[in-house]
């Protein structure tokens, strides 16, 4: 950018606001497409060579939560969402102790200590969440409550962490949980999922980068795809090929990891 090494640079908000405008205008690929056209004009990029796709992790901008925190915060988020659109209806459904239990965010420092106490607390959360979901799905409840994203997240989270036994919800043991890739760790970013690649684990997304890899040629990125954390490179072969075909950049050989 031609700046001096000691230049303080610009405020971080400039970059984040610029990214937000790109996304809002669906213009995030315009710069890459323009660069690729220039590379083709200069003879640096040719179709029908070798390309490879590899991925790396993208961390979600969320607070890291353990299971109890995640479940409690998911219920709190659902209560806040319902309170915003139907406060009088929620006041009729809420138990008096809910106002103290869910008035502040759920944090480890305020959770019970010891495995037995924590399981009891987890089942208390489960009963509260189940009561709220049952009330929302009653025919007499406002129909639009079922479509709230926070309510949908609550329903999926309860299926993941609880099971029914003798008429009550039980807290699943770690070994009985569904695959971790199905878990959403934050009600405020439901697309942020657990990811695992070799020894790397994270919560967030995965970015898949496709580049040319011919010997003795400059290597250039030709496509970028951001997905859920559990998606492997090979699963994206078809959409990557479709995007490369639109740019007339299909390779003769394409190398991808199978995950």
Image (cartoon, rainbow, N blue to C red):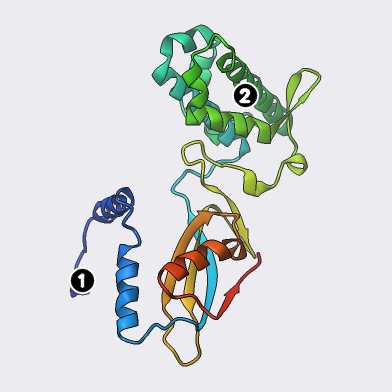
Q: Quadrant of the N terminus?
A: bottom left
Along the line of sight, the residue nearer the viewer: 105 or 28: 28
Which disc, if any, is residue 125?
A: 2
Residue 185 appears left or right of 88: right
Q: Residue at the location (49% across, 75% down)?
A: 250
Q: What element carries label 2?
A: helix
Would you place residue 93 above or below residue 81 in this image? above
The percent coordinates of residue 205 (x first, y second) are 51, 54
Along the line of sight, the residue nearer the viewer: 237 or 87: 237
Residue 24 appears left or right of 65: left
Q: Is mark 1 on a helix, strand or loop?
A: loop
Residue for badge 1? 6
Residue 20 appears left or right of 88: left
Residue 238 appears left or right of 25: right
Crowding at mark 1 (Cα within 10 Å: few <14, some 14-19, many 20+): few
Q: Residue at the location (57% across, 11% down)?
A: 139
Q: Quadrant of residue 185?
A: top right
Crowding at mark 2 (Cα within 10 Å: few <14, some 14-19, many 20+): many
The percent coordinates of residue 81 (x first, y second) are 44, 24
Q: Which of marks 2 and 1 is nearer the N terminus?
A: 1
Residue closest to the far right: 166
The percent coordinates of residue 201 (x first, y second) are 60, 57
Q: In which quarter of the image is residue 66?
A: top right
Residue closest to the far top: 92
Contact flag, marks 2 and 1 (Cβ < 8 Å):
no
Q: Residue at the location (47% across, 41% down)?
A: 189
Would you place residue 28 above or below residue 47 in this image? above
Q: Residue at the location (31% across, 50% down)?
A: 20
């Amino acid at each position: 950018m031609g700046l001096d090494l000691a230049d303080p640079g610009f405020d971080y908000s400039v970059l984040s606001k610029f990214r937000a405008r790109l996304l809002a205008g669906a213009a995030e690929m315009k710069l890459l497409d323009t660069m690729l056209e220039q590379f083709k004009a200069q003879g640096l990029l040719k179709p029908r060579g070798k390309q490879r796709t590899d991925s790396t992790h993208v961390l979600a901008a969320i607070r890291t939560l353990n299971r109890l925190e995640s479940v409690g915060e998911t219920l709190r988020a659902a209560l806040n969402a319902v309170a915003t659109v139907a406060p009088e209806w929620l006041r009729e459904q809420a138990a008096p102790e809910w106002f103290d239990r869910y008035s502040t965010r759920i944090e480890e420092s305020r959770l019970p200590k010891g495995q037995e106490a924590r399981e009891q607390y987890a089942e208390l959360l489960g009963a509260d969440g189940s009561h709220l979901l049952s009330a929302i799905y009653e025919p007499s409840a406002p129909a639009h409550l079922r479509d709230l994203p926070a309510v949908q997240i609550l329903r999926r989270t309860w299926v993941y962490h609880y099971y029914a036994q003798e008429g009550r919800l039980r807290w699943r043991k770690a070994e009985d949980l569904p695959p971790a890739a199905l878990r959403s760790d934050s009600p405020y970013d439901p697309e942020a999922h657990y990811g695992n690649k070799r020894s790397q684990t994270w919560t967030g997304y995965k970015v898949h980068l496709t580049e040319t890899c011919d010997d003795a040629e400059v290597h250039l990125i030709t496509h970028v795809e951001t997905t859920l954390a559990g998606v492997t490179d090979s699963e994206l072969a078809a959409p990557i090929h479709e995007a490369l075909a639109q740019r007339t950049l299909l390779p003769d050989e394409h190398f991808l990891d199978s995950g």
